[in-house]
Image (cartoon, grey):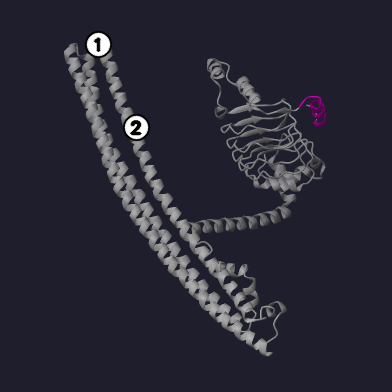
């Protein structure tokens, strides 16, 4: 086997190649089946999306490129090239086996979409760290021999791969570490093969005893991390649920806090006498209204969901009932039709045959009319259901918006009231300052606002404007999003029904055409 250095010296004398369409077509053509089907494929051209295996070894490829069309590829061989980066594999989501051995790769990357990968070879590269494999949840075989891995913590990283059974690290500095094998046996207890040797259960047990304390500590940390990830996942799921109800972040002081996050003047004014108490009371009342919006939003979302689920059930029930009627009509037709066909085949008299064929043709036409009538009845039934659903959901959304706007108006009323009180306190403070009798010492940046009445009125007004804008923006966002949701939902329902109808009409026509064609062929045969 060639060493990494020798491989590089060999390739230094050869011009690097580009992975272009010509190279890919040639490779696909050469590797395709050699029998008649394969020759035909060569003549007519092979679609890259149909290729399951691709071999591109010893091509002096410098950069992975132009593989985006191989969306169903299962096996990719890119070994013995001069590739420096793992890239261009994003679309190969069906890939199971990947060989990138004997290249010049220094970092593991670009594998985030390869969720079905089971076998990965990065043998004989320049990799010093095992990471960026998190997405490879099905990984069973990992070959990383002849690289530059020297830290035992890389082994701990591999604990997350529950399917990993075969690992190769021979030829890395890490293998020179004391207890290299025992450390791996203990930390990767499900491993079956290490460096091409099967691991005995007895040795695994010894390793587990030796590292029991550190493994217990590691398991404890992993458990804590797992709990944390589950909590984060639950929080994300809740957030998505709240977003579906259009009331995310309204179950806390988030909106109120955001009003003051960019309000420099308001923050300064909060240190005025009695403003702290005023602000506390304001926040409590404001958050209660937000919570009311939040709870109301969740309840309305449940009602909208129930309305949609009920509608979908009604639609599916109507379609099923209609299909059952159609199947019964087809079954009766086919029973009679088969008997007629048998009679025609056995009938020696040409005139009687012609008469029976006409009768069969009339039966086919009658079946067509029956099936199309059933479909038209279903279209009318579903159209009525869709229109009723559209009215109901539109009314629900309209009522929701109206009540939300009423609650948001209460938030504005609180803000207006707070603004008036703050303005009174600010002007009173200004008068005391001008008289030289302030209640308490004020910070310099706050005192700078109390130069004259216009300055302090402008400062209080600017704070008020910021708060109102935040409230308005949140209300506008909610209204826009739920209106958009409603519009898209109704449009999709209408489009889905159009597509269903077209598909059903096509099915009916294809079936009737087949029956008529079968009859025509029988007629031609008998006439002949």
The foreground one among 511 and 195 is: 511
Question: In terms of secondary structure, where does tag 2 sit?
Answer: helix
**Vertical position of residue 81 compared to residue 345: above or below:** below
Question: In terms of secondary structure, where does tag 1 sit?
Answer: helix
**Vertical position of residue 76 compared to residue 348: above or below:** below
**Residue at position x 69%, y 78% in the image:** 448
Q: Quadrant of residue 13?
A: top right
Q: Residues within 10 Å of mark 2 (few under 14, many from 20)?
A: few
**Vertical position of residue 418 compared to residue 60: above or below:** below
Does the magenta portion include 14? yes
Residue occupied by mark 2: 506
Residues drawn in magenta: 4-15
* Tag of residue 503: none
Residue 180 located left or right of residue 282: right
> Which dot, 2 or 1, sits closer to the camera?
2
Q: The C terminus lies in which quarter of the figure?
A: top left
The foreground one among 100 and 479 is: 479
Give whichever of discs 2 and 1 has the lower sequence position.
Answer: 2
Mark yes or no: residue 107 visible: yes
Q: Residues within 10 Å of mark 1 (few under 14, many from 20)?
A: few
Residue 39 in the image: state x and y as whole percent. Answer: 56, 16
Residue occupied by mark 1: 527
């Amino acid at each position: 086997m060639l060493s990494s250095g020798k491989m590089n010296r060999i390739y230094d004398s050869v011009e690097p190649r580009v992975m272009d369409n010509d190279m890919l077509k040639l490779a696909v053509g050469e590797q395709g089946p050699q029998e008649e089907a394969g020759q035909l494929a060569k003549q007519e051209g092979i679609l890259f999306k149909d290729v399951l295996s691709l071999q591109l070894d010893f091509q002096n490829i410098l950069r992975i490129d132009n593989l985006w069309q191989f969306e169903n590829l299962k096996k990719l061989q890119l070994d013995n090239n001069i590739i420096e980066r793992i890239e261009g594999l994003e679309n190969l989501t069906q890939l199971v086996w990947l060989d990138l051995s004997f290249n010049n790769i220094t970092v593991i990357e670009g594998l985030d979409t390869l969720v079905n990968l089971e076998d990965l070879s990065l043998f004989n590269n320049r990799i010093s760290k095992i990471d960026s494999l998190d997405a490879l949840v099905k990984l069973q075989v990992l070959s990383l021999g002849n690289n530059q891995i020297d830290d035992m913590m890389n082994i701990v990283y591999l604990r997350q791969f529950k399917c990993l059974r075969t690992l190769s690290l021979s030829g890395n500095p890490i293998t020179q570490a004391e207890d290299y094998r025992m450390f791996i046996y203990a930390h990767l207890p499900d491993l079956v093969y290490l460096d091409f040797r099967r691991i005995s259960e007895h040795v695994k047990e010894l390793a587990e005893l030796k590292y029991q304390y550190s493994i217990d500590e590691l398991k404890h940390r992993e458990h804590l991390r797992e709990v944390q990830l589950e909590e984060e996942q639950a929080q994300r799921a809740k957030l998505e649920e709240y977003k579906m109800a259009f009331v995310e972040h309204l179950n806390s002081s988030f909106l109120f806090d955001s009003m003051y996050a960019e309000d420099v003047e308001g923050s300064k004014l909060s240190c005025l006498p009695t403003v702290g108490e005023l602000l506390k009371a304001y926040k409590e009342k404001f958050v209660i209204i937000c919570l009311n919006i939040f709870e109301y939003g969740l309840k309305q979302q449940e009602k909208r969901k129930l309305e949609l689920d009920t509608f979908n059930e009604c639609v599916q029930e109507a379609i099923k009932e209609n299909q059952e009627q159609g199947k019964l009509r087809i079954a009766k037709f086919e029973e009679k039709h088969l008997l007629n066909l048998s009679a025609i085949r056995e009938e020696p008299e040409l005139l009687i045959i012609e008469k029976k064929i006409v009768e069969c043709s009339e039966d086919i036409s009658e079946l067509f009319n029956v099936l199309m009538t059933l479909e038209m009845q279903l279209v009318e039934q579903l159209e009525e259901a869709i229109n009723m659903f559209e009215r109901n959901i539109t009314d629900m959304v309209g009522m929701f918006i109206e009540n939300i706007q009423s609650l948001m108006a209460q938030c504005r009323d609180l803000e207006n009231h707070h603004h008036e009180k703050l303005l009174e306190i600010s002007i009173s403070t200004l008068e005391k300052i001008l008289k030289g009798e302030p209640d308490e010492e004020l910070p310099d940046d706050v005192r700078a606002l109390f130069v004259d009445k216009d300055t302090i009125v402008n400062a209080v007004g600017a704070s008020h404007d910021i708060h109102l804008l935040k409230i308005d923006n949140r209300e506008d966002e909610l209204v826009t999003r739920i209106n958009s949701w409603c519009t898209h939902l109704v449009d999709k329902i209408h489009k889905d029904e159009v597509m269903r109808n077209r598909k059903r009409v096509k099915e009916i026509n294809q079936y009737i055409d087949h029956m008529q064609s079968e009859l025509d062929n029988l007629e031609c045969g008998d006439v002949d």
